[in-house]
Amino acid sequence: MNIMLIDDNKIDLFVNQKIIERLSTGCDIRAFTSACSAINFLKILEDKGAYPTMFVPDVILLDINMPEMDGFQFLEAFDELSGIDKKSIRIYMLSSSTSPQDVEKIEESNSCIGLIDKPLKTYIVEEILEEFRPYLKQFDAEAEDINLVDCKQSIKVK
């Protein structure tokens, strides 16, 4: 599973990355301190022939409030990308904002599937990772022994 973290706060990036690494050793994580650099990275992916083995995110955890390009501007630029399978990428906004306008913008977005309150919590990451573990029930005889917290209400999904 590939996870892209986008946050201008380096401490938040570090902590979020450590939480994800602790919960899943199978994740490849790319962290960006600006939405501009993250969108430029994704633009490189549009030329699939040149970079067939390049990191393509399954999940993007995106801060709302950033200088240069905020989370909503990132979503607009993301929507304009044409050479990648955007439907397979799950974008969650991270925010400590309680602004009804932010929640409304997220709900109106075609690309963002939910809002996660900051700081990122372990059980939220477990829920996101669980969505990408469909193989457990098919191939793991002890899949029922996996004890992940059921917290579907934690992420405000549209």
Image: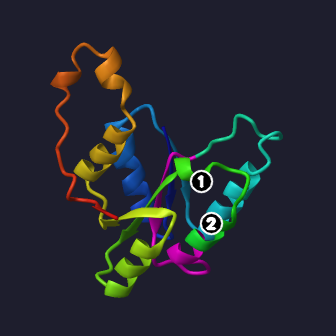
Q: Residues within 10 Å of mark 1 (few under 14, many from 20)?
A: some
Q: Residue 82's x, y, as percent?
A: 72, 57
Up the image or down, 143 lies above or below 62; here it is above
- The amino acid beneath tag 2 is Asp
Q: Quadrant of the C terminus?
A: bottom left
Question: Which residue is located at x 37 percent, y 35 percent?
Answer: 24
Up the image or down, 138 lies above or below 75; here it is above
Colour theme: rainbow
Q: Residue 142's x, y, as percent?
A: 21, 16
Q: Which mark is residue 124?
A: none
Up the image or down, 35 lies above or below 50; here it is below
Query: Is 107 positioned to the left or the right of 140 in the image?
Result: right
Magenta-colored stretch includes residue 5:
no
Which label's residue is closer to the chain start, 2 or 1? 2
Query: Is 72 positioned to the left or the right of 18 in the image?
Result: right
Q: How many marks?
A: 2
Question: Which residue is located at x 38 percent, y 80 percent?
Answer: 104
Question: Which residue ends up furthest to the right in the rendered image?
Answer: 50
Q: Which mark is residue 79?
A: 2
Q: Which quarter of the picture shows residue 49?
A: top right
Q: Residue 33's x, y, as percent?
A: 56, 65
- In this orientation, which residue lies closer to the viewer: 37 or 129? 129
Question: Which residue is located at x 62 percent, y 61 percent?
Answer: 38
Mark 1 element type: helix
Query: Is 138 positioned to the left or the right of 42 in the image?
Result: left
- The amino acid beneath tag 1 is Lys
Q: Which residues are magenta?
A: 57-74
Residue at numbered disc 1: 86
Question: Which residue is located at x 46 percent, y 64 percent?
Answer: 112
Mark 2 element type: helix
Q: Residue 30's x, y, as percent?
A: 55, 49
Q: Mark 2–mark 1 contact, CB under 8 Å?
A: yes
